[in-house]
Amino acid sequence: RKLGIALVGLGYYSSGRLAPALQETQYCRLAGIVTGTPAKADEWMKKYNIPKENVYDYKTFDRIADNKDIDVVYVVLPNSMHEEFVIRAAQAGKHVICEKPMAIFPKACQNMIDACKKANKQLAVGYRLHYEPFTKEVIRLGQEKVFGPVKFIESSDGFRVGDPKQWRMKKAMAGGGPLMDVGIYAVQGSRYVTGEEPISVTAQFSPKTEPQKFTEVEETMFWQFQFPSGAVSNSTTSYTAGIERLRASCEKGWFELSPAFGYGPLKGMTSKGPIELPHVNHQAVHMDGICKDLLDGKTLPNHVTGEEGLKDVTLLQAIYQAAETGRKITLKG
Ligand code: NAD
């Protein structure tokens, strides 16, 4: 049996990535949609053969509780809306996948975790890279210390943002700029390569080169984490130019992914030669990985759950605090 997934929010990521990926998944299928735009509902029903009774809008959404066709709700809305829809999905008795960043503030993440626990439903975050072969390999190289202990890391992700009017440029909806959007990948990269939690952070905003465009959110920023083993990381995130790489320098060599965080093909190299692995559809392996565990009645692995999402959101806020105060912020580790 394939689990039925309902996508909530039919913007770029749902239409360009998730729905096509759901045409090649083994353990799940596109069963329903939740949209505020009737024209999109018609288009999707035709294109993906979705029955009318599996189509909801944001008001009728809670009726999804009575729909046996839908096992998992996947929230793909602007960041500030994740909390409400994850909680409503859990209350409707569905497992939930929530896009990254899980929320803007840690408190919202905790509310989402609590709601899913209370409903006895599982909560996953859209961390597709944890199911992606090149990423899994650098996690192994780092955490198993294949090149000796990791000493320093460069982990950066950025791109040139398009339409300045989109929700990504609005602080209330996005929570911030590139840090919230793609900087989270750089945070994840430094955490999964070391397998450690940072114990302190320093951070800096770059001066704005396009102040008329970046009125509410940062344009580019930098941060540094210190890890318990002594490893340090340096990261850049930006909405003004592209950067995408993860490189770890270890006592006896190095490894890197460049590109490291996009939809692929990712490319890997080590001090001993190239990393050769199959290229996969990130969204298909992500949803299949989660749904296989759900079908097998397993608890999802820690690194894709709401608890992991909460850790990252806590760090994102600490990075902002460090940049705003100019002080080194001590973290729980
Ligand atoms: P998008 O702007 O393309 O789509 C957002 C959707 O939300 C649209 O369908 C829009 O109609 C709907 N929406 C409902 N209420 C809205 C409101 N009040 N304001 C604006 N839009 C509203 O965005 P996207 O790129 O699809 O991103 C959605 C989520 O997915 C974000 O959290 C983003 O971080 C995440 N995302 C993740 C990945 C990944 O690789 N995991 C990639 C892209 C986006």
Image: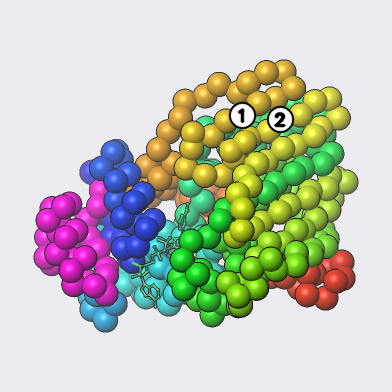
Mark carried by residue 4: none
Residue 224 seen by the camera: yes
Residue matched to label 2: 255
**Image height check: is 287 above or below 171?**
above
Ligand 1 resides in the quarter of the picture at: bottom left
Residues at circles 2 and 1 in contact by the CB criterion of under 8 Å: yes
Left or right: 270 as drawn, with respect to 203: left
What span is in magenta? 28-56
**Image height check: is 238 above or below 142?**
below
At 88% across and 46% down in the image, what residue appears? 230
At 48% across and 61% down in the image, what residue appears? 162
Residue at disc 2, secondary structure: strand
Asked if the stretch drawn in magenta spans residue 193, the answer is no
Residue at disc 1, secondary structure: strand
The image quarter in which residue 201 lies:
bottom right
Label 2 packing within 10 angstroms: few (<14), some (14-19), many (20+): many
The CA span between labels 2 and 1 is 7 Å
Label 1 packing within 10 angstroms: few (<14), some (14-19), many (20+): many
At 58% across and 72% down in the image, what residue appears? 213
**Image height check: is 175 above or below 52?**
below
Q: Amino acid at mark 1?
A: Gly
Residue 314 seen by the camera: no
Q: Nearer the viewer, residue 43 or 55?
A: 43
Q: Quadrant of the C terminus?
A: bottom right
